[in-house]
Amino acid sequence: MSTSPQQRRPQHYGTHQGNRADTTGGGMAMISAPYNFVPLSDRVFLPDWSQQVSHDIPFKDGLSGELHYTLIAETPLLVGGRQTRANNGNPGEVRPFRLPDGSYAIPGSSMKGLLRSVMEIAAFGRMSKVDEVRPGLRDISKADSVYATRIRGQVQTGFLRRRADGGQEIVPCQMLRLNHRDLETALRIDSPIFQARWSVAKKYSEWKRLCQQRGRDPLTLSFDLGHPDATKLFNGSHQGVPVFTGQISDSTSKNGKHRDFVFYPPESQQPAIPVPPEAWRDFLRIHGDEDGKPDMSWPGYWKAQYQAGAKVPVFYLQDGPLLRIGLAYMPKLAGDFSTRDLICHSSPVHRQEPGAQNGYDLADLLFGAINSQNQADALRGRVSCEMARAKGQPGPKAQPPTILNSPKPSYFPNYLTQPVDPHSWKLKKDQYVTYIRTDAACAPTLRGFKRYPVRPLADAQVQELTDQQRENRSVQVRLHTLPPQTRFEGRIVFHNLKPVELGALLWVLTWGGKAGLRHSLGMGKPFGFGQVRIELQADRSRLIPNDPAEPEAALTPERIEQLMRAFVQTMTEQIPQWERSPQILNLLAMANPQSATQLPAGMELRHMRLDSKQHVNEFQAAKKDKLVLPDYAVATGALDASSFRPARGKPCTASQPHAASASVSAPTTAPAKPAEPAFKETEEEWTNVVLTWNKGNRSLKATAAQQGTATANQADADKLLAMLPQEQRDKLKKKGELKGAQATVTIKGNYYTLIRLAWPGTS
């Protein structure tokens, strides 16, 4: 990194004056977040033995047994049990999970989730545990933003209503603006009619009060047509419905919001527009239907009106096949791409359901899998985690009240892969990649698996609330955490695992034997809570071979190392330079508390601040400065910035192959490959390439860490080998691997073909 590590301070530190003065107009050095991402790979490892896995038919080299372990909390720990909601001005409470006898414990499901989440990354599994949503976008930071360009001149108005069959439709209408100064004159009031930061519910309540005091009907408004504002309010020849949206600013300030709307019938009646189910789902999610926040327009006001049979004034766009509906003149747009579309852009293999046709990844094989389309493809797990019980009687500690923020994937500077300079972490281009399709970003990708980097014990504490957050006790919560050094003892039972599978489990439990690394468990991860380490109790563990000719063996340190080495070797064969891949470097960096001490100045493990009363909006400031959340391995020095390569997506189509080159080990029963999609063929020059020669089938592969893997068929392999100098050619044939070559590769869709080889320094 070109920046030096910051001077030590608590990682939750978020009220320093250095950034505060600039948090509405830019001037931020880096984006801060308590989370980061392990990059999503375009390669998925599907073991070739996955079709042979069974509980009933043992592998000849299979192993069964049990692993006893001690789990030690390194920071305050809370695996949630009894919870109470905030009430009467008191914050909510979350206390640790307890058994009926009063002892503290960690459910087996929590341990299974911990292990599986690491296994999916370390073993290059599918990223499949993701909800199918289209994140909303409302970006008014620039007049020429992707969002502004998409909606300019396209927004229409109408009334959303429920049909007799329970569906929804929009009745189109026309709209004029309502100037607040004109409303104040018509109602004969001397002060601003609406105050800054008033919600929709508060504005309608005030409007109703003022109208009733003056004998006016709050549901209708007479006016004359003007441009752009309605005139002769309460005395005009047209009838309409006053429509108010949230008051985000002081209406009397420069650039403050001082207009709302009046909706009125069109000159000629237009047919109602049916709302497709997917558009309705997008609308509800984007507008917080599940969040229930009272300051939001839908849950705070319009939802109850709609359920009571009222018509809801909406702003909508008919954007090709998509209908996008909002509650403001600059409405949130549901993305062109869903979260699963973006994952597919990395590799369509990620989206395949596990089963006989598509294969299983290593996490599926150990912990089980389900297939929503074919129950016969469901797979029982062969690893079972039992309840882990606390030793002694640790005493919980009540933490200061806080807010459990839920990061939103709609914040694209963090969640989407961006064209970024890895030295400054600013955009290389003028526009961010978003969930909206553009010519420059037709196949955006997700950053990857979200993780919460660990940190030293001194930095593990709740983030200080802003002044505005302190006022809202109804969303605050108090976490009751068990103290550091609380110890739990548990057992993991495994059945019929191949040595490489047991090696994978041991690698995940112990981080490959690397001392000082930590797992994350339970609640409060954004504050550094829940950091644990796991120590195996080898003397109590059992290892029982399936082969009756082999005796039961002790799980000695040497045996553990042998098994983990089998896993590492398998992964290295499938993913060249696996241990130095961006995925593993990021995973390990986020598990190392010392990495947090190496973050560059301005990058902190905390939520960014948003406080309208203090005019602080770090989210907006970061976008104004074109910042991107840094890659954690690069930011902490685990990966050199010059080696950083943002992932490149490829469009997903219905005809894309199920077992594409993105799958490094296709299932043995893979279906016939469909016709290749019509992608434009491009050519790339790769450097520092690792060549792999398979003497048995005379195949040649070329792998570059960031670009991918290209192959050559038997007919071309010998011709390509002949392009190398004799010394390198002999070395490759003898050892099966050669590092440092140069390669020319053609790319067409998901297919990478090796067409030329060269060796540096030779002609």
Image: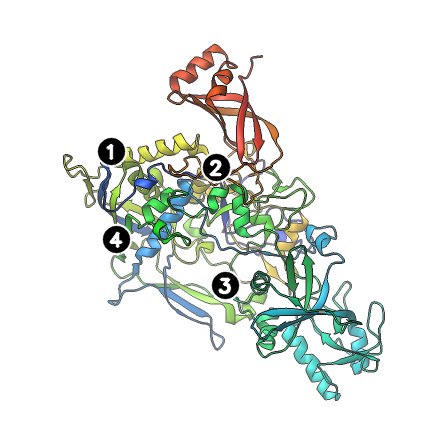
Q: Nearer the viewer, residue 627 or 201?
A: 201
Give the amino acid type for the residue marked by disc 1 in the picture.
Answer: Glu
SS class of the residue under badge 2? loop
Residue 216 appears left or right of 686 = right
Q: CA distance from mark 3 to mark 2?
A: 50 Å
Q: CA distance from mark 1 to mark 2?
A: 44 Å
Give the amino acid type for the residue marked by disc 3 in the picture.
Answer: Ile
In the displayed structure, 754 sits above or below 619; it is above
Disc 1: which residue: 558
Q: CA distance from mark 3 to mark 4?
A: 31 Å
Residue 748 appears left or right of 271 = left
Whichever of callouts 3 and 2 sits on the residue coming sooner in the sequence is: 3
SS class of the residue under badge 4? strand
In the rendering, which numbered label is found on residue 489? 4
Q: Nearer the viewer, residue 75 or 476?
A: 476
Q: Residues within 10 Å of mark 2 (few under 14, many from 20)?
A: few
Whichever of callouts 2 and 4 sits on the residue coming sooner in the sequence is: 4
Q: Position of residue 320 (x, y in %)?
A: 67, 54
Disc 3: which residue: 403
